[in-house]
Image (spheres, helix red, strand yellow):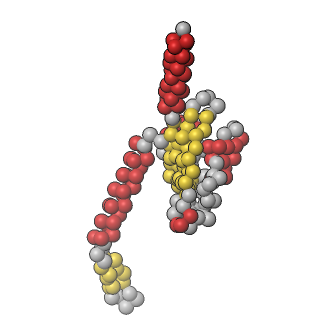
Amino acid sequence: KIDGHRTRNGYRVAVSSDVTELKRQKAELARLSHLLEATLSAAERGICIWGPDGRLTMWNGQVAGLLDLPAGLLTAGRSFAEFEAFLKARGEAALASTAAVAEPGKVHRAQVRYEQYEHVRPDGHVLDVIHTSLPDGGRMISYGDITAFRRVERDLRERDERFRHLSSAAREG
């Protein structure tokens, strides 16, 4: 790259810079950004990443579907407090519970915390919720629908109970 200008005396001053490395770094950054977006989009879980300032920086489309969120709630820069207030207002504060996760911007590398729990939505869906505080002071929350797994688990318990009951009745009869 060559930049230049004329001086007041009519001379021309030119500065040349080798931007090969800069272009390579930009291409690599674009590649990694595309890869990250593709990974987030392909993930089965809904994922939200909040920066150290408590503002939404990244998310995937699965979050809105799993949490039944209105269009526009997930936007870059949305504060975690607004997200939390929305969930509290509709009676699902547990989806944003941060009891074991440090407040945004107040975590140090040695204090990274993790919290995992299940939440039953009003429509009966069961979500696996994972909160992780990030080393930079932000946080990541991921949501996975485990309704089918819990249903199969319940059906197996019921079958086991019926089997025990029938087995006991056969011994007595």
* Residue at 33% across, 66% down: 25
* Residue at 30% across, 65% down: 24
The answer to whether residue 63 shows anywhere in this view is: no
Q: Position of residue 29 (x, y in %)?
A: 37, 61
* Residue at 33% across, 61% down: 28
Image quadrant in which you'd find residue 111: bottom right
Direction from residue 50 to residue 90 in the image, left or right: right
Direction from residue 53 to residue 43 in the image, left or right: left
Residue that lies at the very extreme toward the front in this rendered image: 172
Q: Position of residue 56 (x, y in %)?
A: 56, 53
Residue that lies at the very extreme toward the bottom in this rendered image: 9
Quadrant holding the C terminus: top right
Residue 69 vs 162, above or below: the answer is below
* Residue at 70% across, 43% down: 88
The answer to whether residue 9 shows anywhere in this view is: yes
Q: Out of 66 and 34, give the one closest to the viewer.
A: 66
Q: Out of 161 and 16, give the one closest to the viewer.
A: 161
Q: Position of residue 40 (x, y in %)?
A: 43, 47
Direction from residue 9 to residue 116 in the image, left or right: right
